[in-house]
Image (cartoon, rainbow, N blue to C red):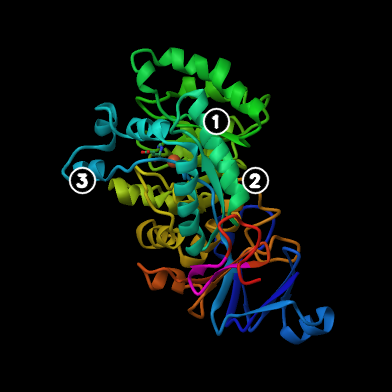
Amino acid sequence: MSLLVRGAHQVATPTGNGARRGSNLATLTVFSDAVVRCENGRITFVGEEGEQRRRFGEPDEILETEGGCVLPGFVDPHTHPVWAGSREDEFDRRLRGETYMEIARAGGGINSTVRATRAASSENLLATTLERLDRFLTHGTTTIEAKSGYGLDLETELRMLEVVRNANSNHPIDLHPTCLAAHEIPPEYRGDPETWVQRLVDEIHPAIARSGLAEAVDVFCEEGVFDLEQTRRLLTDADSLGWRIHLHADELTPLGGAELAVELGALSADHLMCVTPEGVGALATSETVAVLLPGTSFFLRSPWAPARALVDAGCAVALATDCNPGSSPTESMPMILALATLGMGLGVAEAVTASTLNAAAAIGRADEIGSIEVGKSADLIVLAEPTYHHLVYHFGLNPVRHVVKGGRIVVRDGVRCFDRAFHGPVDA
Ligand code: NIG
Ligand code: FE
């Protein structure tokens, strides 16, 4: 099966198999009047159309982009996409002055979503997750990291991760599952958090690791949730469980999460709204990717992460939605790019690299996805407008017109075009 993406005004992409840093974050390779050829799910050619024809002959299918801009599909390296219920009441309370943590300590927050998720059937969780995935995909996201964390008991955490596995095989988006059983202290352990930490270490993490349903582990390291020492205990055996590490670090208070992530060799340290200069310094000299989530700052009306300082210090910076019902209910990476530029001060090219190649590095996949280069998976988006600046410039709307995942057209003219049980596009 071959696909030719032709007629683009611009094909724009970062290049390489690892995260880009410092001034290289802004370096995109931009082709004018180039085509992209895909064979059996991989990119086999990027360049001049005549040369493509001489080397490869006629393709099975052509996607006419009509002067649009072709970019790599977004990689969203931090999402909580499986949940039941909704928290718009808390949103309104926050608008009237209560804080996220005050609401959480009064029985709302993550634990209110835990109650709804425990009560929901797996079928219902899968159906709502697939709807969310459709929204991710139509906004240009072709791969996500997907956390559990609204079960907070072994049975529901396993059910959430099974939903992630089922969604992965029933939807074009690739999902990379992370165990976030250490997301909160469940109501049953509110008076005795130490026992909950010990149960996670002794029983819940090992059982989830044995299930093979998670690739990585995450902890919400935060004042009033898991402190630095508890987080260290929760994560020190991650290697022996076969897990890479992500960490919710320095989100609402500066606890030293960034430094701990570096010490443990984590793939990523995420949020970092309150990261200290020492944390920035530690990240800059490490392979740990700084995943920034400006949707959360926007939605909680809290400070932006110091994106400029992180980039200028030489950290590997990526962007993600943090899609979840409490602090960032959005699937839209174009919205995140708007906030990253207009709010956090990144340039548009920097934001493109941070949401594609560097985001792939944050989930350990930069050698397979995240750029338009020969050999990588053919995950592409086509904007209706001619240049990549339009991702952000025309803000508030979805700039993504077509989406190609693994060499197949899965969104055409803004509408998904694959069967619900994904065995290929409807019109193939
Ligand atoms: O990344 N910080 C912890 N977890 C989420 C919020 C989850 C929720 O409020 O439901 C976050 O912001
Ligand atoms: Fe999160």
Image quadrant occupied by the N terminus: bottom right
Residue at the extreme left = 96
Residue 398 location, quadrant: bottom left
Look at the magenta stretch and give its main secondary structure.
strand
Q: Amino acid at mark 3?
A: Asp
Mark 1 or 2, which is nearer the eye?
Answer: 1
* Amino acid type assigned to the residue bearing label 2 in the image: Gly
Sequence-earlier tag: 1 or 3: 3
Q: Which residue is mark 1?
A: 158
**Other-residue count near label 1 (Cα within 10 Å), few / some / many at <14 / 14–19 / ≥20:** many
Secondary structure at numbered mark 3:
helix
Q: Is mark 3 within 8 Å of ligand 1?
A: no
Q: Label 3 near label 1: C-beta < 8 Å?
A: no
263 is within the stretch colored magenta: no
Q: Which residue occupies 55% across, 42% down?
A: 164
> Which x, y percent locates residue 237?
62, 22
Which residue is tagged 2? Answer: 364
Magenta stretch encompasses residue 415: yes
Q: Nearer the viewer, residue 165 or 121?
A: 121
Q: Which residues are magenta?
A: 409-417
